[in-house]
Image (cartoon, helix red, strand yellow):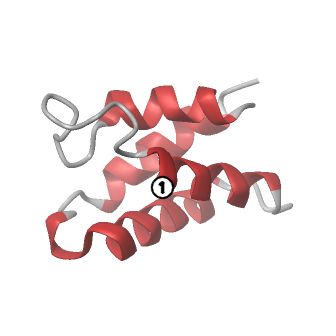
């Protein structure tokens, strides 16, 4: 699993709908945080990753991030399917 594998998933999700007008690196910092979390943790449970994704986006985008936990859970599942 690489940063770019995760970037494809996050960019496809486009949780704030910014990629139509923002630069294509809009979510790179958040993606890097997710990548580092996965790389540095032994716990690869979907719910743990979903919570981390939610916390990362809430931290960086605050009230603008209105996505549900279930969306984060679906993204986490997709990421963890990467070989």
Indicate the quadrant where residue 11 lies.
Answer: top left
View extreme (right): residue: 42
Q: Secondary structure at mark 1?
A: helix
Task: Sort mark 1 into few (<14), some (14-19) or many (20+) by Cα contacts within 10 Å.
Answer: some
| 50 displayed left or right of 49 | left
26 or 65, which lies in front? Answer: 26
Report x, y in % for residue 12.
35, 27
4 or 44, which lies in front? Answer: 4
**In the picture, which quadrant includes the C terminus?**
top right
Taking the spot 22% from the left edge, 33% from the top edge, the residue there is: 19
Taking the spot 55% from the left edge, 40% from the top edge, the residue there is: 77
| 66 displayed left or right of 5 | left
Taking the spot 53% from the left edge, 46% from the top edge, the residue there is: 76
| 81 displayed left or right of 16 | right
Q: Is residue 59 above or below residue 67?
A: below
Indicate the quadrant where residue 22 lies.
Answer: top left
Q: Which residue is mark 1?
A: 30
| 83 displayed left or right of 27 | right
**In the picture, which quadrant includes the N terminus?**
top right
Report x, y in % for residue 58.
33, 71
Q: Count up the numbered dots.
A: 1
Taking the spot 59% from the left edge, 36% from the top edge, the residue there is: 79
Q: Is residue 75 above or below residue 29?
A: above
Q: Is residue 1 above or below residue 62?
A: above
């Amino acid at each position: 699993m690489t940063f770019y594998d995760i970037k494809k998933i996050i960019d496809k999700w486009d949780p704030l709908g910014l990629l139509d007008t923002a630069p294509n690196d809009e979510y790179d910092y958040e993606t890097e945080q997710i990548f580092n979390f996965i790389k540095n943790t032994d716990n690869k449970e979907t719910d743990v990753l979903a919570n981390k994704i939610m916390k990362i986006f809430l931290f960086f985008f605050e009230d603008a991030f209105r996505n549900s936990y279930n969306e984060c859970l679906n993204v986490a599942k997709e990421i963890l399917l990467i070989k």
